[in-house]
Image (cartoon, coloured by chain):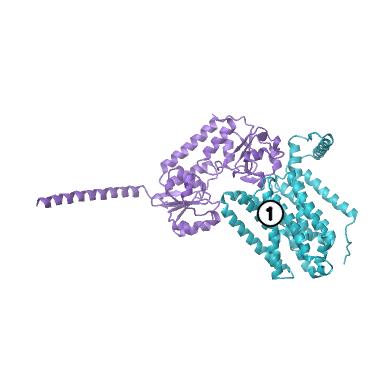
């Protein structure tokens, strides 16, 4: 008998434990269903509803990958576009191509709930194909810094990381405000943003670019602000407009002169103020060309370059 | 039937030189930044005096300074010179190739020789082939080599498939070869993914940022390879009557063909490695000029030299100034103008025929 009592007790204890487990499981499940569904308006104005925050996501644009990592959702990234290169660990995520070489089959095989893409490099057909296969396509398409905030908040909502996203946006706003406050422009300094070096034909960043926006924030005048977006410009015009600063985003491949040195050595450029003063900055990690949180880093580097480090 | 003289007379050469020089001056005086003619002239006079003065006194040359001087002397002048030389070289190469193949549609761009040269240069960039003693020699040597190999391959195929080298065969082989080269290029890019940007920009080509060293290289290539082509104008005329006939009148067909192929590859390779692939120049200028000069290469070759220089200088002027302060790629302008002119010629020829 004694034995049987003991047995019943053990059984009861086990039962209780099992029930407890079951309840807690129920509890977490309940909590999840409470916080969902999530409705997000993407940057094309389309409404996307998810039953719960996305746990598997593919991002094709480098900037969206950067945002995912910045809000602490990098673990959910199961596939990435070809040119996603920041932060370094993104390289370990399977690559699914991008642009016209996007591998739709591979994306589907990764079974993501959400696919993040931009309108610039992807097509509507690709979006439709993925939607038909049950992947929710969300468009992020930031054209200015305000748009980057929108993208961060949107991605935050998708991933159930609203607080982290809000904090990130706030920190960016504060950082930019600080820089704007600290900058003491005399209103006359001009800057030339070189997007493609002379060897391949000059391209400059004009108005409606992140570089232009950051320049204005720091009290600098973009000397090609009469052009829209990135534009191929005449070498003569650069000499004529005589910028006080030059920022080049040319990549350096470890051979030949550094991009700054190459600009300094260009024949005919010796009369350009920036070249005379050696005021040339090379930002080659896309700090100021991607709609991502690192715009702050780029703005800081430009600030330090123009106004001196503290 | 118009009867053409065997070669141009001295006054005719003088006229060509005057026209080319006139266009050259116009292109130097016009640009994205407008510089008053008076300043242009005085700047050039000062520069010339400075250089000559330094030769006489053996001192450091005193050149005019200031932004205007830099724009004119360091940017615009070398660019216009490079453009003129590239135009002349491409046009001459085109004329020689058309003579060699007895086909008016043969050209570096239609046959895919330019693409082949570009592939060579891209390989040099992707796999880091360089010759430390000479700047940009890596891309140049591989470009010339690949241009030559492309020509050999194209001609080998053409002769094997269709000994009469009809237009259809030439065009088809050109199309197929260009596609082949472009897929090879994609493969190279896949292997050198870290240099995609470098390579893509390079294949677009640009006459921007060309300096006096480029002028010298182009001039050297034009004098050497162009000279070789000029020395063979009689043989080219003989080829026009068919290779067998050429052989009968004592032309060493194989040797001449090889020499001309090397000269043409040299011109195209050097041009491509300096300014990228610029289409239609070698096709359209000789074609238009043939209507004036007749088929005799003793007249056609010099005319192509001047005509090509003028055509490309004007095309580049349009590229530089039409969308000011933006710039177009000169290849876009030549292809636009070239395609239109070409269709007009083709249409008229068909109607007449």
Number of numbered discs: 1
Instruction: Tell me: B191 left or right of A233.
Output: left
The residue lying toward the viewer, choosing from B49 and A176, is: B49
B227 vs A306: above or below: below
Q: Is residue B255 visible?
A: yes
Q: Residues within 10 Å of mark 1 (few under 14, many from 20)?
A: many
Residue drawn at point x = 52 percent, y = 56 percent: A102
Shown colour of chain B = cyan
Where residue B345 appears, as percent x and y from the top left, is 77, 63
* Of residues B167 and B157, the one drawn nearer to the viewer in this rendering: B157
Query: Which quadrant holds residue B341?
Result: bottom right
Residue A188 horizontal side relative to residue B246, left or right: left
x and y percentages locating residue A44 in the rendered image: 51, 50
* Above or below B259: residue B217: above
Q: Using the image, name the chain to which the residue with label 1 belongs.
A: B
Q: Residue at x 50, y 41 (%)?
A: A293
Q: Secondary structure at mark 1?
A: helix
Q: Quadrant of the C terminus of chain A?
A: top right
Determine which residue is flagged by label 1: B143
Q: Position of residue A277 (x, y in %)?
A: 65, 32
- Viewer can see residue B112: no
The quarter holding residue B334 reads bottom right
For residue B320, above or below residue B299 = above
Q: Which chain is in purple here?
A: A
């Amino acid at each position: 008998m004694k034995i049987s009592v003991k047995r019943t007790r053990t059984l009861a204890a086990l039962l209780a434990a099992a029930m407890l487990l079951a309840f807690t499981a129920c509890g977490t499940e309940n909590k999840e269903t409470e916080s969902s569904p999530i409705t997000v308006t993407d940057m094309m104005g389309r409404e996307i509803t998810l039953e719960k925050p996305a746990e598997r996501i593919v991002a094709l644009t480098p900037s969206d990958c950067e945002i995912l990592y910045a809000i602490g959702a990098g673990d959910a990234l199961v596939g990435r576009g070809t040119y996603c290169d920041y932060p370094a660990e993104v390289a370990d995520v399977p690559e699914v191509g991008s642009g016209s070489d996007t591998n739709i089959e591979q994306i589907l095989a990764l079974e993501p709930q959400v696919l993040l893409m931009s309108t610039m490099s992807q097509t509507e057909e690709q979006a439709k194909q993925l939607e038909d296969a049950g992947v929710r396509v969300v468009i992020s398409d930031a054209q200015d810094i305000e748009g980057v905030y929108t993208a961060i908040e949107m991605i935050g909502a998708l991933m159930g990381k609203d607080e982290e996203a809000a904090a990130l946006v706030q920190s960016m706003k504060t950082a930019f405000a600080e820089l704007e406050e600290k900058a003491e422009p005399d209103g006359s300094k001009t800057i030339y943003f070189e997007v493609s070096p002379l060897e391949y034909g000059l391209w400059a960043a004009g108005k409606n670019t992140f570089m232009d926006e950051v320049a204005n924030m720091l009290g600098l005048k973009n000397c090609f602000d009469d052009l829209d977006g990135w534009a191929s410009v005449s070498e003569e015009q650069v000499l004529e407009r005589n910028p006080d600063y030059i920022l080049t985003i040319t990549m350096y491949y470890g051979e030949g002169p550094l991009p700054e040195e190459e600009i300094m050595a260009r024949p005919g450029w010796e009369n350009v103020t920036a070249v005379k003063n050696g005021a040339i900055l090379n930002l080659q990690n896309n700090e100021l060309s991607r709609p991502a949180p690192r715009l702050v880093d780029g703005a800081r580097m430009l600030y330090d370059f123009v106004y001196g480090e503290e | 039937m118009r009867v053409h003289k065997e070669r141009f007379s001295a006054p005719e050469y003088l006229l060509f030189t005057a026209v080319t020089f006139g266009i050259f001056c116009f292109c130097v005086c016009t640009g994205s930044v407008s510089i008053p003619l008076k300043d242009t002239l005085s700047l050039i006079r000062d520069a010339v005096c400075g250089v000559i003065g330094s030769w006489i006194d053996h001192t450091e040359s005193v050149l005019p300074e200031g932004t205007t001087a830099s724009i004119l002397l360091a940017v615009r002048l070398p660019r216009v010179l490079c453009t003129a030389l590239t135009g002349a070289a491409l046009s001459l190469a085109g004329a020689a190739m058309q003579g060699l193949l007895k086909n008016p549609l043969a050209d570096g761009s239609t046959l895919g020789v330019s693409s082949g040269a570009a592939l060579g240069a891209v390989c040099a960039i992707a796999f880091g082939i360089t010759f430390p003693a000479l700047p940009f020699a890596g891309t140049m040597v591989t470009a010339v080599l690949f241009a030559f190999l492309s020509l050999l391959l194209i001609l080998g195929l053409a002769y094997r498939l269709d000994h009469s080298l009809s237009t259809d065969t030439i065009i088809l082989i050109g199309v197929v070869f260009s596609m082949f080269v472009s897929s090879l290029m994609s493969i190279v890019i896949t292997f050198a993914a870290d240099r995609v940007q470098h390579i893509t920009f390079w294949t677009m080509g640009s006459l921007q940022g060309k300096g006096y060293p480029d002028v010298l290289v182009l001039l050297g290539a034009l004098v050497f390879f162009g000279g070789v082509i000029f020395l063979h104008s009689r043989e080219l005329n003989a080829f026009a009557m068919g290779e067998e006939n050429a052989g009968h009148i004592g032309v060493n067909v194989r040797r001449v063909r090889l020499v001309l192929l090397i000269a043409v590859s040299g011109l195209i390779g050097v041009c491509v490695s300096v300014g990228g692939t610029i289409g239609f120049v070698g096709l359209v200028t000789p074609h238009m000029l043939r209507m004036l000069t007749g088929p005799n290469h003793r007249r056609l070759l010099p005319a192509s030299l001047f005509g090509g220089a003028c055509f490309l200088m004007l095309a580049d002027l349009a590229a530089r100034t039409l969308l000011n302060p933006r710039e177009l790629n000169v290849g876009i302008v030549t292809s636009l103008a070239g395609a239109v002119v070409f269709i007009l010629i083709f249409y008229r020829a068909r109607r007449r025929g």
